[in-house]
Image (tube, rainbow, N blue to C red):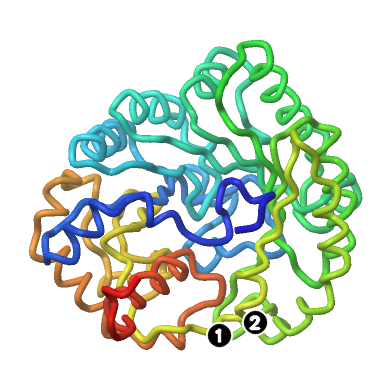
Amino acid sequence: MNNRDKYIMDGHKMLWHLDRISEWQKGERIPPLHIDVGLSKGCNIACEYCFGIMQGNQYKKGKTTFFPRDPLLRYVRQAGEVGVRSMAFIGEGEPLLNPHVYDAVVEGQKSGVDIALGTNGILFDKGPDGEKALEHLTWIRFNISAASDEAYRRIHRSHDFQTALDKIRFCVEYKRKKNLKVTIGLQMVLTPSNVDQVLPLATLGSELGVDYLVVKQCSDTVENSLGVFNNLGEYDTYSDILNEAEALSTCDYSVVVKWRKIGEKGVRTYNQCLGVPFLLYSSGDGKLYPCGMFFDHKEEEYRMGDLIEQSFIEILQSKRYQDVVDAVKKIDVHRCYSGCRTNAINEFLWDITKNAPQHVNFV
């Protein structure tokens, strides 16, 4: 593990959940460890690398399509009841477009689930709602891949750079004022067109007083939908810049580069997607899936259920849920998109079930 990556962002944390793995190995139906939760089908900006456009993100046209309050609160409560250990409100759209996001943060944390929020930050509330959210979040991550107003307009196609910085500063100041445990970070999605922002953004993160900046790969389909997949080889030329950025880390501030994900270039070391029971995805309009790719692709085939019409517990116990889990095992993973969220989990599960060495008792 990179000693700067104390969060293990560039891998997995399955070794800390051996009880759930043991249940899965016995063939038991388990609740997921984590769920990536979409709260909206829209966004207030239009980043040049937006993966959400392949998930049904409709930008400003979709801002009125979001997860309704009552089903959302039922969802996070039941997640706690069945043993889900974390939920990240990051979704295919901007979660802060959902007016119920702050209630969901509080309700989820009170239900025993670690709650996180990934946002561009522009709409973050600086009043009581935002303060209460910071008091209940495990972490908040601001998605920003530009370190100047000009670059922000080019990369995020927005004039709200200073607003985003203002909201980040507010969170940092409130955390310090109340001595909160919440971790505050920045996330940069690295592409060939914004590599010039790596070092300025690493410096900006330190100046803002956040806990970390993480630099990650840009996910793309094998069909090159975002124009990145066919250029993944270019990432090899960024090593010097990325190493220089990491060197800006201090005892209070980490610059974390996802070297593993950047270097894998969409190549899989396993032949089956086994990680679905451990990591689920729900869309901004309240539907549950085994993978974010199915929000707007083969949606009917891989939808596990509708969280607005059904309870989370009802879906988990349904035959449909297990049928989808089994169907995903038959997918050709070598045609899946690069930068897959479940990839590291799949590598681990494949090794312990399908690729175990001989004489395992000789540790």
Q: Is residue 112 above or below residue 37?
A: above
Q: Residue furthest front?
A: 362
| Amino acid under disc 2 | Phe
Q: In this view, does 140 lie above or below 363?
A: above
Q: Quadrant of residue 223?
A: bottom right
Which residue in the protein does label 2 denote? Answer: 229
Callout 2: 10 Å neighbours few (<14), some, many (20+)? many
Q: In which quarter of the image is residue 287?
A: bottom left
Q: In the image, 355: left or right of 93?
A: left
Relative depth, front residue between 230 and 60:
230
State which tag comes first along the sequence, 2 or 1.
1
| Amino acid under disc 1 | Val
Q: In the image, 27: left or right of 287?
A: left
Q: Residue 363 carries which label?
A: none
Q: In the image, 320: left or right of 151?
A: left
Q: In this view, does 208 lie above or below 161?
A: above
Q: Which residue is drawn at 33% across and 71% down?
A: 349
- Measure the alpha-carbon separation of dots 2 and 1: 6 Å
Q: Residue at x 60, y 70 (%)?
A: 219
Relative depth, front residue between 243 and 32:
243
